[in-house]
Image (cartoon, coloured by chain):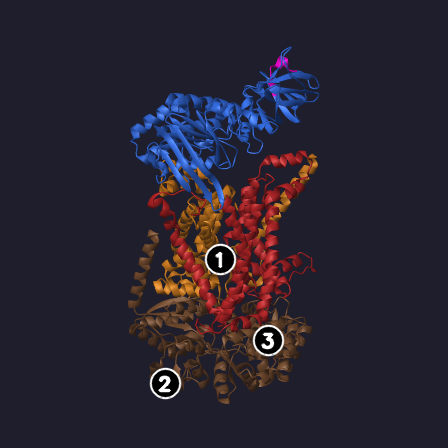
Amino acid sequence: MGALAIKNVTKSFGDTHILKGIDIHIEAGEFLILVGPSGCGKSTLMNIIAGLEAPTTGEVHIGERIVNNVAPKDRDIAMVFQSYALYPTMNVRKNIAFGMETRGVPKKEQDEIIARVSKMLQIDHLLDRKPGQLSGGQRQRVAMGRALARDPKLFLFDEPLSNLDAKLRVEMRTEIKQLHHRLKTTIVYVTHDQIEAMTLGDKIAVMKDGIIQQFGSPEEIYERPSNLFVAGFIGSPSMNFVECHLAEQGGEYGVSLQSEGDARFVALPNGARLADRIGQKVILGVRPEQIEVAEEGEPGLACKVHLTEPTGPDTMIFTQVNGKEVVARVHPRAARHPGETMRLKLDMGKVVLFDPQTELRLV
Amino acid sequence: MDNQNKLWRVALYAVLVYAAVYYLLPLYIMATTSVKSMDEIRAGNLIALPMSITFDAWGKAWATACTGVECGGLSRYFWNSVQMVIPAVLISTTLGAINGYVLSKWRFRGSELTFALILFGVFIPFQVVLLPMAQTLGWFGMARSVAGLVFVHVVFGIASTTLFFRNYYVGIPDELIKAARLDGAGFWRIFFKVVLPMSTPIVMVVLIWQFTQIWNDFLFGVVFSSGDSQPITVGLNNLANTSTSVKEYNVDMAAAIIAALPTIIVYVLAGKYFVRGLTAGAVKG
Amino acid sequence: MQALRMTLCAATMAVAFAANAAEVEVLHWWTSGGEAKAAAELKKMLEAKGHKWKDFAVAGGAGENAMTALKTRVVSGNAPTAAQIKGPAIQEWGDEGVLASIDDVAKKEGWDKLLPPVVSNVMKYKGSYVAVPVNVHRVNWLWVNPELLKKANAKVPTTIDEFFATAEALKKAGIQPVAYGGQPWQDATVFESVVLGVGGADFYKKSLVQLDQNTLKSATMVKALETYKRIKPYTDKNAPGREWNLATAMVINGKAAMQFMGDWAKGEFLAAGKVPGKDFLCVPAPGTANAYTFNIDSFAMFKLPNKDAEKGEKDFASAVMSPQFQEVFNLNKGSIPVRSGMNMAKFDACGQESAKDFQATNKKGTLQPSMAHGMAVHSATQGAIYDVVSQFWNDDKMTAKQAADKLAAAAKVQ
Amino acid sequence: MTSYNGPAQYGFAERWLPRLVLAPSFLLTLVFVYGFILWNGYLSFTTSRLLPNYEWAGLAQYTTLFANERWWVAVKNLFIFGSLFIGGAMAVGIFLAVLLDQKVRQEGALRTLYLYPMALSFIVTGTAWKWMLNPGLGLEKLVQDWGFTNFTFDWLVNPDMSIYTVVIAGIWQSSGFVMALFLAGLRGIDDSIIKAAQIDGASLPRIYWKIVLPALRPVFFSTLMILAHIAIKSFDLVMALTGGGPGFSSDVPATFMYSTAFTRGQMGVGAASAMMMLMTVAAIVVPYLYSELRGSRNG
């Protein structure tokens, strides 16, 4: 059974087109991430799902129903806002109870739900405080508690972690994931942070300019990005893009790479599929961890190290290939110092190629 | 450094106190004159302290001075003003709050234009509306009644109250309203349960503002009221103004202070809320 | 909203109720001191006749606020029974078609015989009485502090020349000769007394009443303006904006010797415990002993919705004209009764002289309406003349000739 | 369908309630502000004198108005008064706000003192002001009594200067309010900005002038609008203080309109002058409203 379906939704203000035909479908219990840079339309889409804004055209289905003409309160959804949107004049208990009061939930039931939710989120000692007296993380929990008390068919999270500091953000991320596992609810989660997207989502919709660039599982999106934008947006550090020409050498199809002082031809597995593009320019996308240190005797490209960035478990090596800066993620012990040379090889089974004109992935 | 700092503080306080004197001087003159005797006023320096203090003028201004064929002092007018000010302030503030709420949180197509149109009303010179208003009140049968006066003050108070509230409510995050809507609350429930409890600072500002405006109004008061419903400014004017008879300045001044007392008290007691309310966002945009 | 609707409802009821009661609502600006007491007499008399007096007092700016209030009330269809309107303004209101005739009262009581034609003409609109006069103020008085004059060895002036001689003598003796209040209406008050003194009653009539262009631009008018301006050096520089009664207080307290002002100034002297003829003198303004500029307060009657109210209106008119009221009121206000044949025994010397001169000048034809007090010309013209006179007084660069031309231009303002 | 930038609304209540709730105020404004402006505009083309009439007079009233010297004095005075009053009240208000922002003891009391003139009508304080400014009674006499016999302060009675006394009294009344507005603004400014500038070695006046006050631009503009509308509407200030005098040297359009329309029986001219005033107001306010409108569309 589909939990949420969005069919050809558009949104425009006069000549400004915010959303240009969005199609999304997720199943019950799935965790959908809407990710993209600011201004991509993800928050508008979220508001349309919530019913806080109306789509210009298209349909929104929640469960079995078309909800275009259903008020937010009747859509059986709950939402956690970036600013938490806690009612400043009410204490935590009242904040959580407000929606239940509005819906006429009996007092006794309210108390039970508040007790259960606050215990789950470890905010039971804060129930009599006002939002102003809470820390950012506590407010975040209260906002979630308010949503949980609703027990809705669909949870909406609008950048819920972006106002927290880095450490708290990681903690809360884990908690949200655990909560999802435990409650098996359907969640739509908006973020501009691709790490959150990768760690939390069952399905990710990468958006830009009001269009879904790619919709799929985190693995699909990471490994087979559909275009240059998605490839560059997902992953940290970003994917390296190297311009090169497709060529044939000794019956193998591949590209030639030049570093400062070295050059070699590398073959592409399944390169034969690109036979009709021989001689044309392509963009080679390779993630930093797909660049490895060549073992003794293995073929490798001798690259000059410009800069190193140790992160602890790995060290980032900055070098240059085909005139472009390239980052490689290597084991700290394998790293050389700036000015020295390292022999690097690409994991050609995982690299992706893009058409420079259409920016779409070739294979 | 320390000495220089001290000097700077002394200069600072000197300027502040000097300014305070400038602001207080008219009130000082009014207060001292009101407790002088007429002989002393005729003879002496206006700025000088009174040689002997008498409160006769106060009693006269309140209870026995003539303001027409009646000689009952200002007391009657005072209560007229109270009767007029309270409903006028409450109604205009309520309307302003609701308008501000709609114009900031429930925008619809044309709501911005509506706001601009209402706002322009702040700037209309009131002399322009006297006659058409009189005619309209006549049609409604509200001419020369307290209700008519209340109505006029409400109509021409809406613009500023709406502006105050709207600018304050713009500062309330829209997400709060969204959250409340998702919680199932409707237009009124959001207003009363979420927005209004957050409005204390601006409500104070608007109440104080409207109270002073309406209490001090003379033009509407003199034109839209008649004998037994005239507000205190008209009473004061009648008491202090005379074309061809003897002036009693001490009584005039006592009457002026009596007329001003409620607003002064409001400012002294609630002035900090006024500044606090302005701080809380009334001055934005 | 609910509250508003309720007050609305209550208001309609209140108005409906008020209309059933026979009440007399009178707009006036006698709100304080002796004036208020005088007005209270009227109230008493009407209540004795079984009417309810509804006070509609609006003070300030010589009736400016009252006129505003009156206009809005007439526009709103709620005219008062009567309003304090005087002079040509009565004709203006008559033109608007809102005044009511009280001819039957006037005929019954024989007003035509009781009032001099100069007065009754003003009270009539198209031949019908629409207003009732209350009193007569004489405007062309000069108030004198005799003690100061004695100190300076100067005599009480009767002509313009004597006036300046006296002023000069006072100045030499270190005494401020003239107490002056620099407000437009006071400027005009002094100015018209000077015009009367310089040009005489006929000239006054031609220039300031009939607004004859040639007369206004004539050499006599230039001379009158020059004479007026000659007074300025004998005033103090604090004069602008000063209330008339503060100027009077200067004469009372011996800070200045003389003041041009109407007979209401007497009230100030009396209030300060001064005795006329001894502590202060009232003499006609220099050169005007044989003329009289009058300022008559009157009530114009408005058209009313029902018979009850009309009855009240007529009783009101009758009461105002009654000898009893005329005496009490004018004793309180410092003016004299407008009705002829009154016993003046209770009045003081100034009042008695005023009454005598009123009758005498009436016979001579030198009884003239005061321009400065809205008895002679329309309010718009009057305002324009005020502007010129005040500007001339205050602007030392303007010549008398220029001022005369401006006066002529102002006279065209309708 | 063009969409508006507002929340989606569902059902009769959400869709119509906001409009319905706003409707009374909107209608009142439409009738009692715009209707009356139109009425007044019509009146300015009629022969109305003592009371309104509806006999067409074309532009005659405007011709009369423009030929009237007093009107031009009033217009000139409005410009003098407007610029000095706005500038003065702004300067005094900002100055006091900055001083009060220096962690002053008794700040609350001082603030109330500076603010209280706002609470008083000039109907109430007019006489006291007249006395203070009167050379023979007030300041001049006081200072001369102290022995400075050469001291003169006769602006109230000097036709060339009288409008400036109105400015002084106007500043007295409004500067406290400006102070409150700016103090509110100053309190909203992040302390760390000032600290950062102090570390950079900037002097306190320089910090305020270069950093803090520019940050208060929005306050500046709303204060400007408030003061401008006080200036244009100023009526009882002038009435109580100078009555437009000496002569008509301190007349302003509001007093001019009042006296022509109500005292002198030239209602048509009064209406014409009111229309001129309204156009002035519109010329100032409409651009402001326009920017306000655009601003809130983005907000």
Task: Give how far across and how far down residue C86 sits, in percent.
Answer: 45, 76
Q: In the figure, the orange chain has which letter?
A: B
Which chain is disc 1 placed on?
A: B
Residue that mark 2 sits on:
C110
Decide which of A170, A318 is in the foreground and name it: A318
Residue type at mark 2: give it: Gly
What's drawn in magenta, residue-wise? A328-335
Confirm or deny contact between disc 2 and disc 1 (CB under 8 A). no
Residue C359 % position (x, y): 47, 86
> What residue is disc 1 on?
B256
Question: Which one is nearer the viewer's eye here, C291 or C17?
Answer: C17
- Tell me which chain appears red: D
Residue at image location 51% in from the left, 61% down from the top: D278
Question: Chain in blue?
Answer: A
The secondary structure type at the circle numbered 2 is: loop
Measured Cα–Cα span from mark 3 to mark 1: 37 Å
